Amino acid sequence: MKYAGIAGAAGMTGLAGCLGGGGDDGGNNGGGNKVEVQHWWTGGDGNAAITALFEGFEEKHDIKIKSNPVSGGAGQNLKNVIKKRVLNNKPPSTWQAWPGKNLQPYVEADKLEDIGDSVWSKNGMKGAYLKGPKQAAKPDGKFVTVPLNIHRLNNLFYNVDVVEKAGVDPKSISKPSDLVGAMKTVESETDAVGMAHQTKSGWSTLQLWAQVLLGEHGEQTYTAFTEGKVKANEQAVKNSLSIVKQYNKHFNGDAGSLDWQQANKKLINGKAAFIHQGDWAAGMYRAQDGFEFDKQWGMVPYPGTKGMYSLVMDSFPFPTNNPTEETTKKFLRYVGSVDAQERFNPKKGSIPPRTDVSKDKFGPFLSRQMDQFQNSKSQPPSIAHGLATSPETLTALDDAATSFNSSWNVNKTYNKFVQAFESN
C-alpha cells in the first residue's frame, strides 16, 4: 500500500489496513501528572541511559515518569503495541521511535501533532540541531518528534594488529570496491578473514549494501534510491550488490549462524580485520579490557563517505489525543535539552544531535565522532533503520537482503528492491 495522498480519516483507514487493529494491548492510558513513556531499552547500556534521562527530568520538573517498556523483537514488539494503541486513540504520552519516514504513516493518518512552536522553539533547539536531524524530525514538513541520540552508520571498524601485520592502511582505502583488494591482502598475509559479518538475518547486509551504494556512487544516487528511483539507477544498485557479493568471499565461514555481536567478537579476537556496523559496535570494544581505541581497534568513515555522517536516531513523538499534553511537552523539551543529551548519550554509546553539548563525558572515540558530526557536510538518513524508508518498504528491502544472503543473486535482489517501492 502506498501512503501518498492519504490524509485525515482516510489516513486512519490506511494505517489500520497496513498496521493491523485489535485490542488496546499496551497498558493503561497514562493520566494525571505522570508522563507515560514506552520504549524498548530494557537492558544493558540502553536501560542505564534511559534511567539517567528519566532521573534528570524528574529532578528538574518534579514530575513522575511512568516507564512502560516493551522488550523483545528488536523493537518490533513495541512498534506493534504502539500501532494498536494509536488506532484505539489511547496512545501513551510518548514513545521511542525512529524519526523520518518511519513516522510517515502516523503523520498521514493525522496522529502526530505539530510541536514546532511548543517544543522546538525552546532550549535553542532549532539552532543547535543540524539539518539532517531536523529534517528527520519533520517527515512531512512539520516538527512532530524530538531526536535524542545519534548512532553513526557509515563506519568501518578494524583490528589494528591485523591490518598492521597485513601492511594495509584503512585510511588509504578510497572507495568500497577497493576494500576487496585490502581484504585479499589481509588473508594472504595473516590468518584473519577480511571482514566479520553476520548473514543470519538480512539487516546487516542491507545496511552494508547501503554504505557501499553511498560510498561508491555518491549521495545523490543514494537519495534517489530512497525516493524509489531504483530503475533509474539500475547500474549503480546492481554494481553495489556485486561488490557486496565479492565481500562475501571474505566473510567468516560461519556468518550464517552468528548474530552481529558474535561476528564483532571476531574483530576483537583478531580473527577478522574489518567489520561494518553502526557505532553501537564500539560499545563492545569499550567494555573489553585491554582493547583501546587507536591502539587495538580503530575506525574510519566507510570508504567513499568521508565528510558524511549517516544517521540512525531514536526520538520521542507527540501523539494526538495525548493523555498528558502539557507535561508531555515539558518532557519533550527536556529530551531536546543539553542536560538530557549529556546524561543519556555517554551511557548509550551514542552522540547528541545537539551540537552544543560538552565532550567531557564522552571519551576519545565518541568525542571524535562528535567532531566529525559537527563538521559533516551532510547527514544521510539510514535506509536499514527506517529514517529513509517507510515501514512497509523497509520490510520488503529487509526480505530482499535476507534472500540475497542465501543466494547472492544480484539480478533477483535488484528486482526485489524495485518491487519494494512499487508495491508499497
Image: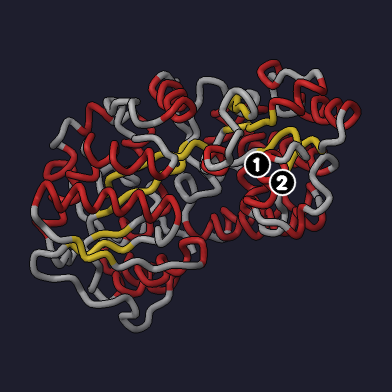
Residue kind at label 1, given as amino acid type: Leu
Residue kind at label 2, given as amino acid type: His
Q: Position of residue 35 (x, y in %)?
A: 17, 62
The residue lying at 30 percent from left, 73 percent from top is 85
The circle on residue 197 is 2
Q: Is residue 292 above or below residue 251?
A: above
In three-dimensional space, the C-alpha distance between marks 1 and 2, rounded to whole angstroms, equals 10 Å
Q: Tell me if label 1 and label 2 are in contact, CB under 8 Å.
A: yes
Label located before the other in sequence (1 or 2): 2
The circle on residue 208 is 1
The residue lying at 38 percent from left, 73 percent from top is 16
Q: Quadrant of residue 322?
A: bottom left
Among all residues in the image, which is located at the extreme front? 289
| Residue 114 seen from this side | no
| Residue 81 seen from this side | yes
Which type of secondary structure does the marked residue at label 1 adopt?
A: helix
Q: Quadrant of residue 51?
A: bottom left
Q: Is residue 75 above or below residue 140?
A: below
The one of 262 and 253 positioned closer to us in this rendering: 262
Q: Is residue 264 above or below residue 131?
A: below
Q: Position of residue 226 (x, y in %)?
A: 53, 43
The circle on residue 50 is none
